[in-house]
């Protein structure tokens, strides 16, 4: 049986003259200032920057959960208005439905789109396998570890076949060992799924491990964002000299060594 096709675009994201200012205690708090960037179809972009630099704000604007003051976000040349099925968002905590099993959590989005239960199970099984949860299909969220729950969240997001996956510190709450194995899995999954991804992280090593390019949001208001190409071969090796050099360079940009 063919998988249901919801999205047929390429998932290219164009950000044009995007600006956002919040108001805090009656004072304007500029967060994003005339940001311009094209995220290529299938590219993985990491967004890093100090706490409060606007990473989540930018991701929420791309998701359509927040409005910019000015500027546009276009997907495959079309201006976005609010949320859309071609985009899926993964937050730090997976927000699973506690009364549904793993496979039903993964298939939830499909069923709300009118896919039959039988077909949804077939599709969901593929994503159960992809995220390495074979054998846990009938488990409930309370029976899963943090890393497993996050995998279900990733599988649920991928099951509806988004063109663009938006992730806000998806591995931030995991312990160091689980985090490294999840990073390896994400690298593998992204290679297989060919989805455009935007990953917010405060972990520079994670950004270098996963991203084609890294957008560094400025710490000081009025500073310019930086865009860095990560031209390291894949699969990436954290101990390779190129990786270590890249990490040093990035730490240097943050004034951390
Ligand atoms: N709804 C809001 N109203 C007012 N100010 C806001 C609002 N949302 C975010 N801000 C402010 O915008 C700035 C950027 O917030 P944002 O959540 O985008 O930062 P971040 O880079 O994701 O930080 P962190 O690494 O801590 O998650 C912060 O100074 C925050 O106080
Ligand atoms: Mg944030």
Image (tube, helix red, strand yellow):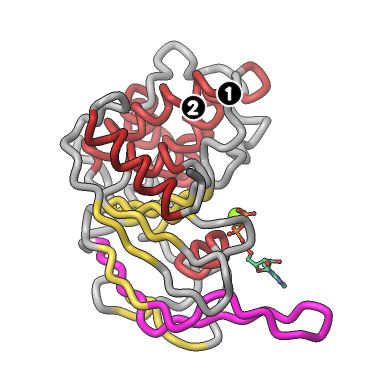
Ligand 1 - quadrant of the structure image: bottom right
- Total number of numbered discs in the rendering: 2
Mark 2 and ligand 1: say if the CB distance to the nearest ligand atom is below 8 Å: no
Q: Name the residue furthest right.
A: 25
Pointer 1: what residue?
175
Image coordinates for residue 70, horizontal then vertical, percent: 49, 88
Image coordinates for residue 36, horizontal then vertical, percent: 35, 77
Q: Which mark is residue 141?
A: none
* Residue 16 quadrant: bottom left
Can residue 100 be seen by looking at this rendering?
A: yes
Q: Is residue 159 left or right of residue 191?
A: right
Front position in the image: 143 or 49: 49
Rendered residue at 34%/56% (across/down): 164
Can residue 90 be seen by looking at this rendering?
A: no
The relative height of residue 118 versus residue 142 in the rendered view (above or below) is: below
The relative height of residue 168 versus residue 30 in the rendered view (above or below) is: above
Pointer 2: what residue?
179
Span colored in magenta: 11-35
The relative height of residue 220 versus residue 50 in the rendered view (above or below) is: below
* Residue 40 quadrant: bottom left
């Amino acid at each position: 049986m063919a998988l249901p096709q919801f999205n047929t675009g390429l998932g290219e994201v164009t950000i044009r003259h995007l600006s956002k200012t919040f108001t805090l205690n009656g004072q304007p708090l500029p967060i994003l200032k005339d940001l311009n960037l094209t995220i290529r179809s299938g590219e993985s972009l990491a967004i890093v920057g100090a706490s409060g630099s606007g990473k989540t704000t930018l991701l929420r604007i791309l998701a359509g959960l927040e409005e910019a003051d000015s500027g546009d976000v276009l997907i495959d040349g079309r201006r976005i208005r609010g949320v859309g099925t071609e985009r899926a968002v993964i937050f730090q905590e997976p927000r699973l439905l506690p009364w549904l099993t793993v496979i039903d959590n993964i298939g939830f989005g499909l069923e709300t789109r009118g896919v039959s239960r039988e077909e949804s199970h077939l599709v969901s099984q593929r994503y159960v396998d992809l995220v390495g949860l074979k054998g846990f299909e009938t488990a409930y969220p309370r029976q899963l570890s943090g890393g497993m729950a996050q995998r279900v969240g990733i599988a649920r997001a991928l099951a509806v076949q988004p063109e663009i996956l938006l992730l806000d510190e998806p591995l931030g709450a995991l312990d160091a060992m689980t985090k490294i194995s999840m990073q390896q899995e994400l690298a593998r999954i992204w290679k297989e799924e060919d989805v455009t991804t935007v990953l917010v992280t405060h972990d520079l090593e994670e950004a270098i491990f996963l991203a084609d390019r890294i957008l560094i949001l400025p710490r000081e208001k009025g500073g310019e964002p930086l865009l860095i190409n990560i031209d390291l071969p894949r699969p990436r090796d954290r101990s390779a000299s190129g990786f270590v050099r890249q990490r040093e360079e990035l730490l240097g940009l943050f004034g951390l060594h």
